[in-house]
Amino acid sequence: MSDRGETPYIIVERGGGGGGVGAFLIGALLGAGAALLLAPKSGEETQAELRVQAKKLRGAAEDRLRDAQSALGERVETVRDAAEERMGAVRDAVDAGREAARDARGEMEERLARSKAAYKAGIEAARETAAVELPPETAAEA
């Protein structure tokens, strides 16, 4: 994984990919068959040797399987951790956005209330000024 914060990913290949446990087992079986055909030993000796080789082959296959399971488990854990970390970051960003929206709404409501109060105060001041400045005969007409 690089240092640039990229998300690790797993590639699962299907189909004619080379190698693997299957190819290993086929090669081992072909080798055992060739050994049977070319062996200068008796049947009992050959059978005993085949048993030993089969146990070795089984042990090697189990080791490879354990290694593969372990590697896959580590990668799955890495991907899970990265996903949880990103989900946490998204949750934090959403929460911060909601908080900012609440703050902005409160500030806008406060400004609107002040503006309404100033508007009402201006109307009252204009009415008072108009009542004081108008002569009595004009005030009656108005």
Image (cartoon, grey):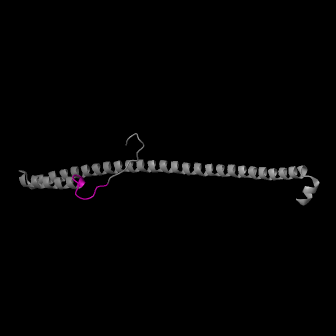
Q: Which residues are magenta?
A: 12-21
Q: Is residue 7 left or right of residue 51?
A: right
Residue 33 in the image, given as x and y percentages of width and height: 12, 56
Quarter of the image where the N terminus is located: top left
Q: Residue at x 70, y 52 (%)?
A: 109
Q: Residue at x 90, y 60 (%)?
A: 141
Q: Residue at x 60, y 52 (%)?
A: 98
Residue 70 in the image, given as x and y percentages of width and height: 35, 48
**In this picture, is 2 found above or below 113?**
above
**Please, which residue is most extreme toward the top here?**
3
17 is within the stretch colored magenta = yes
**Foreground residue, 82 or 48?**
82
28 is within the stretch colored magenta = no
**Foreground residue, 113 or 24?**
113
Q: Please state the total of marks drawn on the protein image.
A: 0
Residue 119 in the image, given as x and y percentages of width and height: 77, 52
Q: Is residue 120 left or right of residue 28?
A: right
Q: Residue at x 28, y 49 (%)?
A: 64
Quarter of the image where the C terminus is located: bottom right
**Foreground residue, 87 or 122?**
122
